[in-house]
């Protein structure tokens, strides 16, 4: 009822404002366009150059590629498709595992009471401060001892183990926002813990799990040092390492092919963001940014 | 209640197991070698706090710590306001805002090592694109040494900002979406201008989210090193050496620089110290933002 007197005087006020706003709007547009242009310069440069030969690139950076070297893409695809397929599979498996583990322990940390909970949680936070570089060598020794090096598992499990700590942190803050009464009502109705988890916790957590999945996928997809250390077999190698193959395989760097490979290799991530951006933001809004 | 507790333990077993077996073991391993002289081969020799004594006198390390703060500070001071303003603009019902958001976010997708090669072609002083244009437009008379001793850090920061703005913009947009529309409507009735609106409504209303984002930004930028490694390897003369890069080189000496040798014992001590530094800064920020909150 109260909204009626409030909105009515607002209408003329807004009309007046819009005429005043024309100038700032123009400035905003100019600044925005400039920023977008600056953002795109390196990417445009990469795309332009991917259609050129070495001589064309070094001769004039901004000239249109004439004639365009479409063959660069064929050559690049032939060289990296295997790595791309591998990495996408690792990323899906690894991120899926992270989501499963984090959903469970996030729920436990948010809604369960058990001795040592605070200590365990503080330990997990402390672990997030440890530099990844510090544990690379001992991790290698450990995975090598387990016989996992040079198998897909060394990538998948290592990312699952590392990512679930951060994931638990995210899921905990998200689930803390879900009213406890919901679980109690289900429990009174005779639902088992498993049912509660599968039917209430997981469906409610879809936004944060999507956010987590995307973050982890990007992490695995762009990983370089860990696979470089642990994977020797070229058939199992990931894209991050695969992209450096060009520098070593041919005596002279073929920059055009290299840029074409960079462009191609970014397609899976562009796709995941094109479809997942909305959920990514949603998950952030509802949980990731709360303590 | 008892059954409930058992359930909690059972539920989180896989997660705890992975953390304990694969997460904690390597950390303990590294913590042990802090007290050893160990070059990666031969027999490790127990030297107590020898590595820390060396660390205290290691001017190169402390220089890298100072550089880290310059790098992180520069990155934060540009990235955070820029991404907040972009978020405010692109959170409005603007035409084509989804396209703008996607474009600003695009750099985040590319890995640091990939883009660093592109940036090298843009910034290098010999035939970099930027210099060609500056010379052609007669803005400078001699090529600017963008990767030289005096400008390298600036260049590194610019590249870091390029890669980070999109991500923080998204985080801010996520935060902005939790601010109720009515607050802005009430403000527009009172004739508040956009700058006032940002300062007096948006930022205070973002409150805890803003704190979280800043904390995230601080820890990430203190840990950044990959693009620096590809672009300058910490040079020239250690001007862009950050502590994580210094640490990395102790474990995996870079072949082209050739000066550093692998030293796992000392590296573990450096790694522990950097973790403490990052932890301390984060804690300090946390403590200060709590204090500020209490003031209001």
Image (cartoon, rainbow, N blue to C red):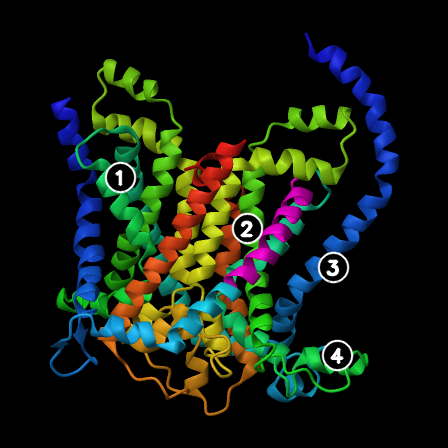
Chain letter of the residue beneath label 1 in the structure image:
A
Total numbered labels: 4
> In the rendered image, which residue does mark 2 sit on?
B168
Circle 3: is it few (<14), some (14-19), or many (20+) Cα within 10 Å? few
Mark 1 to mark 4: distance in Å?
54 Å
Which of these two is toward me, B269 or A124? B269
Q: Are marks 3 and 1 in contact (CB under 8 Å)?
A: no
> Quick check: B284 above or below A113?
below
> In the rendered image, which residue does mark 3 sit on?
A34
Circles 2 and 4 on the same chain: yes
* Element at label 2: helix
Write down the region rendered in magenta.
Answer: B71-91
x and y, in percent, of residue B38 in the image: 18, 78
Chain letter of the residue beneath label 4 in the structure image:
B
Circles 3 and 2 on the same chain: no
Chain letter of the residue beneath label 2 in the structure image:
B
Circles 3 and 1 on the same chain: yes
Mark 3 to mark 4: distance in Å?
17 Å
Whether B14 is among the magenta residues is no
Q: Can you tell which mark lies on residue A105?
A: 1
Going from N to C along the chain, the mark reached first, 3 or 1, is 3
Circle 2: is it few (<14), some (14-19), or many (20+) Cα within 10 Å? many
> In the rendered image, which residue does mark 4 sit on?
B133
Instruction: Name the residue at 29% across, 55% down.
Output: A162
* Magenta stretch prevailing secondary structure: helix
* Element at label 3: helix
Circle 1: is it few (<14), some (14-19), or many (20+) Cα within 10 Å? many
Mark 2 to mark 4: distance in Å?
30 Å
């Amino acid at each position: 009822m109260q909204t009626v007197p409030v909105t009515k005087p607002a209408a003329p006020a807004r009309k007046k404002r819009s005429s005043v706003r024309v100038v700032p709007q123009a400035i905003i547009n100019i600044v925005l366009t400039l920023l977008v242009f600056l953002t795109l310069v390196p990417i445009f440069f990469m795309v332009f150059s991917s259609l050129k030969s070495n001589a064309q690139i070094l001769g004039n950076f901004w000239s249109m590629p004439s004639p365009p070297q479409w063959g660069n893409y064929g050559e690049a695809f032939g060289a990296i498709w295997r790595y791309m397929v591998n990495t996408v599979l690792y990323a899906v498996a690894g991120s899926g595992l992270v989501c499963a583990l984090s959903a469970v322990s996030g729920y436990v940390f948010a809604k369960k009471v058990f001795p040592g909970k605070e200590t365990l949680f503080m330990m997990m936070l402390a672990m997030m401060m440890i530099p990844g570089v510090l544990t690379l060598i001992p991790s290698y020794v450990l995975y090598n001892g387990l016989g996992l090096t040079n198998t897909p598992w060394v990538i998948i499990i290592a990312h699952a183990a590392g990512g679930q700590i951060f994931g638990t942190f995210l899921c905990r803050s998200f689930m803390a926002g879900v009213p406890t009464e919901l679980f109690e009502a289900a429990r009174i109705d005779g639902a088992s813990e498993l049912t509660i988890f599968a039917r209430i916790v997981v469906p409610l957590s879809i936004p944060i799990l999507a956010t987590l999945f995307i973050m982890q996928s990007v992490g695995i997809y762009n990983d370089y040092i860990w696979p470089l250390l642990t994977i020797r077999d070229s058939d199992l190698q990931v894209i991050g390492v695969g992209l450096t193959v060009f520098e070593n395989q041919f005596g002279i760097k073929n920059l055009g092919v290299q840029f074409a490979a960079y462009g191609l290799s970014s397609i899976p991530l562009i796709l995941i963001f094109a479809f997942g951006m909305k959920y990514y933001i949603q998950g952030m809004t509802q949980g990731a940014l709360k303590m | 209640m008892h059954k409930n507790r058992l359930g909690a333990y059972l539920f989180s077993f896989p997660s705890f197991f992975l953390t304990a077996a694969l997460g904690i073991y390597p950390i303990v391993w590294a913590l042990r070698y802090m007290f050893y002289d160990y070059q990666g081969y031969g027999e490790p020799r127990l030297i107590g706090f020898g590595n820390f004594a060396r660390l205290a006198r290691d001017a190169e390390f402390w220089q890298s710590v100072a550089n880290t703060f310059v790098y992180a500070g520069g990155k934060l001071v540009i990235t955070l306001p820029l991404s907040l303003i972009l978020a405010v603009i692109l959170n409005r019902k603007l035409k084509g805002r989804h396209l703008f958001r996607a474009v600003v976010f695009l750099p985040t997708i590319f890995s640091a090592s990939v883009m660093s090669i592109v940036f090298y072609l843009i910034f290098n002083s010999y035939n970099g694109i930027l210099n060609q244009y500056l010379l052609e437009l007669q803005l400078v008379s001699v090529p600017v040494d963008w990767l030289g001793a005096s400008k390298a850090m600036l260049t590194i920061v610019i590249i870091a900002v390029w890669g980070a703005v999109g991500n923080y913009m998204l985080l801010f947009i996520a935060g902005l979406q939790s601010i109720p529309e009515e607050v802005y409507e009430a403000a527009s009735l009172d004739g508040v201008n956009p700058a006032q609106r940002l300062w007096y409504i948006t930022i205070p209303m973002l409150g805890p989210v803003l704190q979280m984002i800043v904390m995230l930004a601080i820890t990430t930028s203190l840990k950044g090193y990959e693009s620096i490694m590809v672009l300058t390897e910490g040079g020239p003369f250690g001007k862009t050496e950050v502590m994580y890069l210094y640490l990395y080189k102790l474990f995996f000496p870079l072949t082209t620089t050739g000066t550093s040798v692998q030293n796992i014992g000392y590296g573990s001590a450096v790694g522990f110290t950097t973790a403490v530094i990052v932890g301390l800064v984060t804690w300090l920020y946390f403590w200060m933002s709590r204090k500020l909150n209490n003031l209001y």
